[in-house]
């Protein structure tokens, strides 16, 4: 067994360990028993010289490593000083400072406050005004509560992955100071947030509703102030991921951007570097959202793995990245939909895309060797890549979307094929229009012109495909169905890989 394959098994074992601890809560006595068993297997294997059993022993150790990592995180939560004050009838006063970008809505705002001397984070909901900013020092007086669990949404677990175990709704807030203590990252982050706010205001000046809402979502991942009727259209047509910095969206966007640059005639290496630079500039611009950063890491590794040109290598690199992210924050596995979507979208592109490509190749093969036909053949191939990326990612993420959102768009494959190719144009021209609009209304208008045409097309697609029959709702679906779905999908992929193997090899 090669070292890379062994590492692949170790990564899977770590993820399984986190999964088991999340589901069944393994007692400490069992943990130590399994740990000792793994050590004994390794020792015995070294004595008798059986390498395969050594790998098995280390897989057990990595499995227990995943279990212990989650147990440590759970222990830290239970012993969090601030959490112990939750739901107390007493009013308490906390001193702290805002971390991250304030989540500003039309009538209220949410602030993440890191409490001084504790290191704990509390989520504060307060009125829309006065406005607070990153690193503002504040004094909060109110009652701590445990985050609620709703019937259709577990808000407590949603915040858990971000290290938030307590909330305060509409407390008394006093601004203590706006003098900020910087390090290199916080200084850069503050400047990014300042630029982002200027760019968003520029979009509002150059575009009217609903175009400004769509562009704000596409360029900056902000769909929080989008009108409800427009959100309904996005959900019904399966395009809501476009206006949010979601895991699957970033991975799909990176892959499509790569295919699009190849379509324009760039060399593969040039397209790779431009795609990586573009997506990380985008992540910086939208303010380093955690889900976006994780998805960008996954997407960047996916592109790198594709450049290496081997499917096994690609999947092992993605698995390594996923296990490292989970080791850093084991709650991502169950409670971070963005992580789930980015991981599954990446695996879908690795394993399913080549199969879909093989079925699409018939549409762009020509016997003629004329230069025109050769160029046309290459352009059709690049366009088919966009189709296969979209379909493969959506097929792999479908159960997660159904489970978390309860609905699925029946026309999503069609609408995504119609819209995704223009998203890079909207991102680029939308950003340029907002950037130049800061300095000159005329320059902003010039760069906004291409956006107007693309947004008219975008809205037309939404209007045409927004139909009552376009969505299917699901309720009370057992996780067993999702397990069956992935088992069947993996079996089908395995079967088609064997059947189409000569085509993969170029015969």
Image (spheres, rainbow, N blue to C red):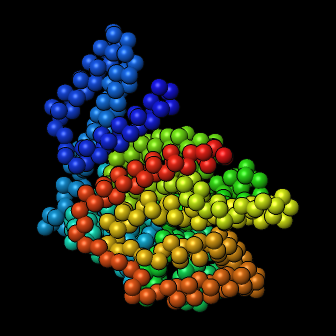
Task: Judge left or right: residue 234 versus residue 406.
Answer: right
In this view, the residue in front, 406 or 438, is: 406
Asked if one can make out residue 291 in the rendered structure from this viewpoint, the answer is: no
Dividing the picture into quadrants, the one containing residue 505 is top right
Q: Where does residue 161 sit, x and y in percent of width and height?
A: 34, 55
> For the point 55% across and 39% down, which residue is it?
313
Q: Residue at x 56, y 84 (%)?
A: 461
User: In the displayed structure, would residue 454 be above or below residue 35?
Assistant: below
How far across and how far down the image is residue 331, in percent? 33, 51
Residue reaching furthest right? 371
Q: Nearer the viewer, residue 489 or 145?
A: 489
Q: Is residue 44 left or right of residue 290?
A: left
Q: Is residue 260 above or below residue 415?
A: above
Q: Is residue 474 visible?
A: yes
Q: Residue drawn at (38%, 39%), measured in percent from left and top? A: 12
The percent coordinates of residue 152 (x first, y second) are 25, 71
Q: Is 505 located above or below residue 239 in the figure?
A: above
Count of numbered labels shown in the rendering: 0
How far from the left and from the top, in percent, is residue 37?
24, 23
Seen as rendered, the residue at the extreme left is 89
On screen, residue 454 versus residue 77, left or right, reads right
């Amino acid at each position: 067994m090669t070292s890379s394959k062994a590492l692949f098994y170790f990564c899977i074992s770590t993820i399984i360990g986190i999964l088991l601890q999340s589901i069944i809560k393994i007692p400490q006595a069992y943990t130590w028993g399994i740990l000792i068993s793994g050590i004994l297997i390794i020792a015995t294997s070294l004595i008798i010289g059986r390498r395969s059993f050594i790998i098995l022993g280390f897989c057990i150790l990595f499995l227990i490593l995943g279990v212990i990592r989650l147990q440590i995180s759970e222990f830290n939560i239970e012993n969090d000083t601030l959490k112990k004050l939750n739901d107390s009838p007493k009013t308490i006063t906390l001193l702290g400072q805002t971390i991250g970008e304030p989540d500003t809505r039309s009538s209220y705002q949410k602030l993440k406050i890191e409490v001084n001397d504790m290191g704990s984070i509390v989520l504060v909901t307060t009125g829309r005004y006065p406005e607070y900013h990153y690193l503002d020092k504040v004094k909060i007086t109110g009652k701590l509560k445990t985050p609620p669990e709703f019937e259709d949404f577990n808000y407590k677990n949603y915040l858990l992955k971000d290290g938030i175990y307590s909330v305060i709704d509409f407390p008394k807030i006093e601004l203590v100071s706006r003098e900020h203590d910087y390090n290199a990252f916080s200084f850069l982050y503050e400047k990014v947030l300042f630029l982002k706010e200027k760019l968003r205001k520029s979009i509002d000046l150059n575009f009217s509703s609903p175009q400004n809402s769509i562009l704000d979502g596409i360029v900056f991942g902000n769909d929080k102030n989008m009108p409800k009727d427009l959100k309904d259209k996005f959900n019904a047509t399966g395009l809501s991921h476009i206006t949010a910095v979601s895991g699957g969206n970033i991975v799909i966007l990176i892959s499509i951007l790569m295919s699009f640059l190849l379509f324009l005639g760039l060399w593969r290496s040039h397209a790779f570097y431009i795609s990586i630079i573009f997506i990380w500039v985008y992540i910086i611009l939208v303010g380093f959202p955690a889900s976006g950063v994780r998805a960008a890491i996954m997407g960047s590794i996916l592109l790198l793995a594709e450049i290496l040109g081997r499917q096994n290598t690609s999947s092992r690199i993605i698995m390594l990245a996923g296990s490292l992210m989970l080791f850093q924050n084991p709650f991502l596995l169950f409670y971070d939909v963005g992580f789930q979507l980015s991981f599954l979208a990446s695996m879908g592109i690795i394993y399913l895309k080549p199969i879909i490509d093989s079925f699409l190749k018939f549409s762009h093969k020509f016997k003629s060797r004329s230069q025109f036909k050769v160029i046309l053949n290459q352009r059709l191939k690049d366009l088919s890549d966009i189709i296969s990326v979209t379909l493969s990612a959506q097929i792999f993420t479908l159960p997660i979307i159904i489970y978390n959102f309860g609905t699925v768009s029946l026309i999503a494959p069609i609408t995504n094929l119609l819209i995704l190719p223009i998203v890079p144009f909207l991102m680029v021209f939308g950003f340029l229009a907002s950037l130049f609009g800061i300095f000159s209304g005329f320059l902003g208008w010039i760069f906004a012109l291409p956006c107007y045409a693309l947004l008219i097309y975008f809205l037309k697609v939404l209007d045409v495909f927004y139909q009552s029959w376009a969505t299917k709702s699901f309720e009370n679906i057992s996780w067993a169905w999702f397990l069956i779905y992935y088992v069947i999908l993996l079996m089908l992929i395995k079967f088609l890989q064997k059947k189409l193997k000569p085509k993969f090899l170029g015969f």
